[in-house]
Each structure stands twice: as C-alpha cells, then as structure tokens.
C-alpha cells in the first residue's frame, strides 16, 4: 500500500480529530485515516465509565457527574496524545461535551444552572487556554438529517433503533449549530455523500489529499502571522 502520509507530505506528528453526530461514520473515518497515514487511534472508552448506567437511570442526578468524568478522561487522553508526540486520529472531540451535551442537559432541565456553570468554568479553565494542546485539524462529518437516519437504521443497533426520531433531529440541529460557531481549531467539513469508505476503501485517498491541502494552507497562514 502506498504511504499516503509521505505522498501528501502530512506531518508525522499531526493530530486530527473526527467530529459529527451519531451515525455519521466517525469510527470508520478514524480507522481508515489511521490506516492510510500509519497513525495511532484514540477511541472513546465507554465500557469503563462508572456513571453511564446510573445516568440512564436518573438523568437529573447524574448528568453533572457524567460530564465531569468525560471531561477528565478526554483531557487525560489529549495530554497522552501530545506526550506521545502526535501522529493520532481521534474519534470524537473534547469540545462536543460542553458545546452539545452539557448544554442540552442544562436547557432541558436535567442539569441545574449551578452545575452547568461549574462545569463550563472547569472546561474553560482546562481547555480554552493557550496551554491546552488543541488538534491541528477538526474533521467534521456532515450530512442531511435523512441521510444520517438512513445510516442509523442501516447499522441496526437496538438502542438506536428504539430512540425516537425527534431525538436524532434535535441532535442533528445541535451539531450543526455547534460547528457553525466553533473556533477552537481549524475545521475541514466533509459531506458524507461524497465518499463511501465501506464500499470503496480507496476513497480515503481523496480525503487525505483534502486534509493535506488544508494543513498546508493553515501552516502558511500561521507563518504570515508570526
């Protein structure tokens, strides 16, 4: 297999984060890019989460605990990635927890105002500083609500099949609002209709080429501001 990292001159220490709503193909993109670039992967650890079952039993009581746990785990993972020296593809970003999930709990009344303000203050102190190692690029996978629902139904996970369509519609809208206001690091938006990594694994090369162009453009902009 051609080394696409060398072919497109992508830095060995690049850190790329994949974001997008449920069913959009984050895990597939993470693994495909990691294989193509010979990078490590960083996937979300759900099995070891001590609050998840409690949270599903009582949203109001455990939403704050769950979000703080996610924040701590993602912060440690981000730190580990940069201690390794980069060369990572990350499935889901640290920014989605505050911009989408904690905000949703607060607005729906399953997180108190005091807890929400405490959580966002903690997030800002830990993450929104010049010292936090932000990714080189956030790759946002986007598609229409209809396309994403089709994918959720296609993969057939029981819990997702039982979830009302209104929830997926709200989540889709929240993600779109979040990404349209996101400024923490550079963004590359990819339309899920323009590639199919399952049926055509070679389509990853066109994505790598876009990533390379984007990284090189951002590097030029940085140099101009030095």
Image: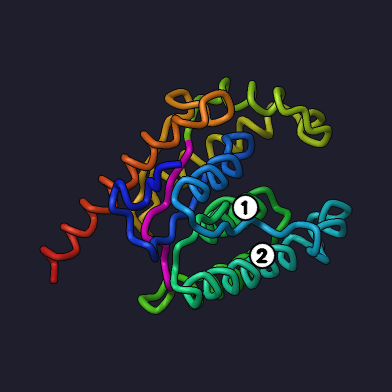
Seen at 38% across and 62% down, the residue is 12
Specify the quadrant of the image occupied by residue 113. bottom right
Seen at 80% across and 64% down, the residue is 48
Mark 2–mark 1 Cα distance, whole angstroms, equals: 11 Å
- The residue beneath circle 2 is 70
- The residue beneath circle 1 is 101
Q: Is residue 150 above or below residue 92?
A: above
- Give the x, y percent position of residue 120: 55, 68
- Give the x, y percent position of residue 46: 75, 57
Residue at the extreme front of the image, as rendered: 1
Q: Secondary structure at mark 2?
A: helix
Closer to the camera in the image, 7 or 42: 7
Closer to the camera in the image, 150 or 105: 150
User: Is 104 colored magenta in this rendering?
Assistant: no
Residue at the extreme left of the image, as rendered: 224
Seen at 56% across and 50% down, the residue is 100
Closer to the camera in the image, 70 or 15: 15
Q: Mark 2 and 1 residues: CB-CB less than 8 Å, in contact? A: yes
Q: Is residue 122 above or below residue 168?
A: below
- Give the x, y percent position of residue 34: 51, 50
Mark 2 or mark 1, whichever is nearer to me: 2
């Amino acid at each position: 297999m051609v080394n696409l990292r060398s072919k497109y001159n992508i830095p060995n220490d690049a850190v790329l984060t994949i974001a997008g709503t449920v069913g959009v193909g984050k895990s597939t993109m993470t693994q495909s890019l990691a294989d193509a670039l010979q990078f490590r992967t960083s996937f979300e650890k759900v099995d070891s989460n001590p609050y998840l079952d409690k949270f599903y039993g009582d949203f109001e009581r455990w939403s704050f605990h769950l979000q703080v746990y996610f924040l701590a785990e993602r912060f440690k993972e981000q730190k580990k990635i940069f201690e390794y020296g980069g060369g990572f593809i990350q499935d889901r970003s640290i920014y989605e927890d505050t911009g989408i999930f904690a905000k949703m709990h607060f607005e729906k009344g399953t997180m108190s105002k005091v807890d929400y303000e405490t959580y966002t203050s903690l997030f800002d102190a830990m993450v929104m500083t010049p010292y936090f190692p932000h990714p080189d690029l956030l790759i946002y996978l986007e598609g229409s609500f209809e396309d994403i629902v089709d994918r959720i139904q296609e993969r057939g996970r029981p819990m997702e099949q039982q979830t009302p369509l209104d929830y997926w519609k709200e989540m889709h809208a929240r993600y779109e609002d979040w990404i349209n206001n996101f400024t923490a690091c550079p963004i590359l938006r990819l339309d899920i209709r323009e590639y199919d990594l399952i049926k055509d694994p070679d389509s990853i090369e066109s994505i790598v080429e876009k990533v390379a162009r984007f990284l090189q453009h951002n590097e030029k902009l940085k140099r101009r501001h030095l």
